[in-house]
Amino acid sequence: MYAVFGPGQAGGAVLSGHSDVVPVDGQDWSVAAFELQEKSDRFYGHGATDMKGFIASVLALVPRALACKLAHPFHLAFSYTAS
């Protein structure tokens, strides 16, 4: 996904991330990789927050950013690779 917000001019900042999950084949996990597990007040899960947390935070702030008078545009670039 690619999106641009703000004034229509060159430049600005790019916020980029990936939304896919790295495969777990051949890895020795001590918990089920794709199930959230709680152990000793900690939570474990493959890809539980990595870039997904970043993407969610960025998207949640888009309305606030659009309410500002931006001097420069900002770009969102989120990729996905199918495995």
Image (cartoon, rainbow, N blue to C red):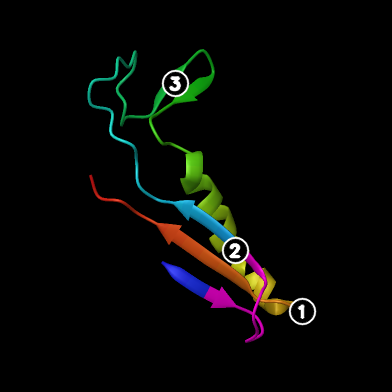
From the top left corner, tell me how far across and down residue 81 is, in percent: 30, 51
Amino acid type, label 2: Val
Q: Which residue is mark 1?
A: 71
Q: Which part of the image, by quadrant, shows the N terminus?
A: bottom left
Residue 47 is left or right of residue 15, and the answer is left
Q: Earlier in the sequence, mark 1 or mark 2?
A: 2
- Magenta stretch secondary structure, dominant: loop
Residue 50 pos. (x, y %): 49, 39
Q: Which residue is mark 3?
A: 38
Q: Which circle's residue, 2 or 3, is located before the other in the chain?
A: 2
Residue stretch in magenta: 4-14
Q: Give how far apart the Cα atoms at labels 1 and 2 are.
A: 14 Å
| Residue in view at x 35 percent, y 54 percent | 80
Q: Quadrant of the C terminus?
A: top left
Q: Is residue 44 above or below residue 69?
A: above
Q: Nearer the viewer, residue 29 or 74?
A: 74
Query: Could you say which quadrant of the image residue 37 lies in?
Result: top left
Type of amino acid at the residue the image marks with label 3: Glu
Residue 30, image x, y percentages: 34, 13
Q: Residues within 10 Å of mark 2 (few under 14, many from 20)?
A: some
Q: Is residue 2 magenta?
A: no
Query: Element at badge 2?
Result: strand
Q: Is residue 14 left or right of residue 65?
A: left
Q: Which residue bears the numbered disc 2?
A: 14
Q: Secondary structure at mark 3?
A: strand
Amino acid at pointer 1: Ala
* Residue 6 located within the stretch drawn in magenta: yes
Residue 6 in the image: above or below residue 52: below
Q: Residue at x 57, y 69 (%)?
A: 75
State how far apart marks 2 and 3 are (Cα). 35 Å
Q: Taking 32 as reference, is 67 left or right?
A: right
